Structure formats: structure tokens, C-alpha cells
Image (spheres, rainbow, N blue to C red):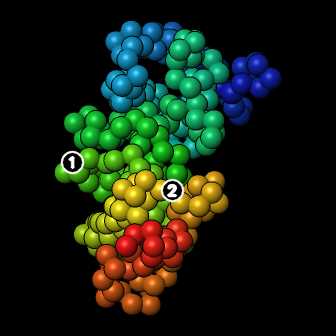
Amino acid sequence: MANLIRNVHGKKTYIGLLSPDELEQANKISDDLEKRIPELELELNNKYPDRKDKIYLAHEFGSYLRKLVDEYNIKGHQESIFWNQIRDFASKEEDGPQDRNKSNRMIYDYYYQLAYYPLKDVENITWSNWSQLFDTSSINSEKKVIDWIVNKGKTEKHKRDIFRDLMTGIRLYVQGKDLTVFSDEQLFEKMNLVYKISKIKDELYERYFTNLNIKPSEARLKRKKHYREKYYKEIYKRLKINKKQNINSLCDEVFKKVYNVKVTEWC
């Protein structure tokens, strides 16, 4: 395992009691990062100046980080320390990667995870959607679920609104479940169902609101997350009682109940 350095009150601090050789290794890694990371940031910022190319910057950055993790022998819990060491002592570009404030997660970790997948698969999903996925820790920790999302992106474009709902649907579905008991085929089948429920929700919103040029109630607009979750929870509860229900009819019934769709609004 690597010997890394922490930032304590703005000063470099060694982790643990280190031998002279281990101190030398820790300093070497720190010195290397201070040189290599700013060079990489500058190179990639110049190579990908357009925000729409962020997915390519992120993947290339992540691929480089994966090489560093192997080179320095970073193991397990050391990864988070490693990202902090890069942020604290190596990142110099003002326009360099910014951490995700909402989740308090290191952006380098996102890049690192992204580079696990081939670029041809990664680019099927926007950086905004990838960020939302990585922000959702309960999904981010389930590699099989991410594999399914990547595979789904090969055949269907992930629309932003549907993807946002999908993250909610998956998060609520996996909550409290041990996914290791499912085979890949079984899990993918369940994720396809969540996707279908999400896609139907998008179609229902368009039918009952967008096409009629009306909006849900003010409460539902202000508390979008609450009602989005309520939609999925109600559907999952009913499916638990009767798995053979027609999913289209079920989603329609629940949607109208959750979003208070009046008969006069859609007849």
C-alpha cells in the first residue's frame, strides 16, 4: 500500500509512524502529484474547452487517475485520502475540476469510476446524468446497477427528465435489498421494470399536463422530490401485493392519484 500525506491545518502531515524509506516514498508521491496533476489539468482544459466535451475530459482524466492508482499501489480506503491529497496539494488550475458540493464527494472519484467503462459506452450518457448517478450513493455502490444503466444507454438515449426519475425509482427499489441474491439476468429484468415505470411517468405527465398546457398544483411543483418518491412507493407497494397487474394501468392510476389529475382535465 502507498504512504500518503494529509493536509492538517494547511500543513503536510504523514499518516502513521513511517520508516525513513516510507517517508521518502510518501514525499515522492506528493512531489510527483504536485507536478503531474497541474500539467494534466492544463492539458485537458486546453484539449476540451467546450462544456459539452466534459464527458471526454472526465473519462481521460479518470483513465490517468487509474494508472496513478496502480502505479502508487493505492488500496481500498486509501482512495479517498488520495483524492484529498490531489485536491490539497496538487490541483492548481483555477478552472480545474470542482468537487460536488451537494454530495461532498471528490470529483476525482467520479472521474476514476467513469473510466472503468469504455469511452464508447460512457459517451452514451451525458456528464450531467453521470454526475447525478454518482451523487446517489445507494446506486453508486451497486456496480451491477451501473452496468445495467450503461447497457441501457447503448440502445436507448437517457432523456434527462426520465433519468432523474429513474434515479429516484432505482434508489427506492434497492433500498434495504441485498442485490447479490439476484443473477444479472434477474436484476436487469427488475431494472427494466423500473425504467418502464419511469418512462410511463414521463408519458403521463406529457398527456395530462404538457399537452393540455396546464401544470400540477403549486404544492406538487414546490415539492417535486416528495411527489416523485410517492409515485414510486405507491407503485412498488401495489406490485408487492399483486405482481401480475398491468403496469400501464397501474402507473396511470397511481399517477392520477399522486398528481391529483381531475377527470375534467383529461377528458
Q: Where is residue 16 in the image (x, y as percent from the top left)?
A: 71, 34
Image vertical order of residue 139 relative to residue 119, above or below: below
Q: Which residue is drawn at 61% across and 29% down?
A: 84
Residue 172 drawn at (x, y percent): 51, 67
Q: In this view, does 73 lie above or below 21?
A: below
Q: Nearer the viewer, residue 266 or 130?
A: 266
Can residue 21 be seen in this snapshot?
no
Q: Dot 1: what SS?
A: loop
Q: Distance between the residues labelled 1 and 2?
A: 33 Å
Cβ atoms at labels 1 and 2 below 8 Å apart: no
Residue 123 position in % (x across, y down)? 28, 36
* Furthest residue toward bottom: 241
**Which residue occupies the foreground of this view, 84 or 74?**
84
State whether residue 72 appears in this view.
yes
Q: Say above or below: 230 vs 108.
A: below
The image's mark for residue 215 is 2
Percent from the top left, x then y, of residue 162? 38, 54
Which quadrant would residue 9 be assigned to in this image?
A: top right
User: Callout 2: helix, strand or loop?
Assistant: loop
Q: Is residue 86 left or right of residue 63?
A: right
Q: Which amino acid does label 2 sit on?
A: Lys
Q: How crowded is mark 2: few (under 14 residues within 10 Å), some or many (20 or more)?
A: few
Lateral position of residue 124 relative to residue 266, left or right: left
Q: Residue at x 43, y 38 (%)?
A: 128
Relative to 28, 59 lies left or right: left
Q: Which amino acid does label 1 sit on?
A: Lys
Task: Read off the residue under disc 1.
Answer: 154
Q: Which of marks 1 and 2 is nearer the N terminus?
A: 1
| Residue placed furthest toward the right | 9
Picture quarter with the C terminus: bottom left
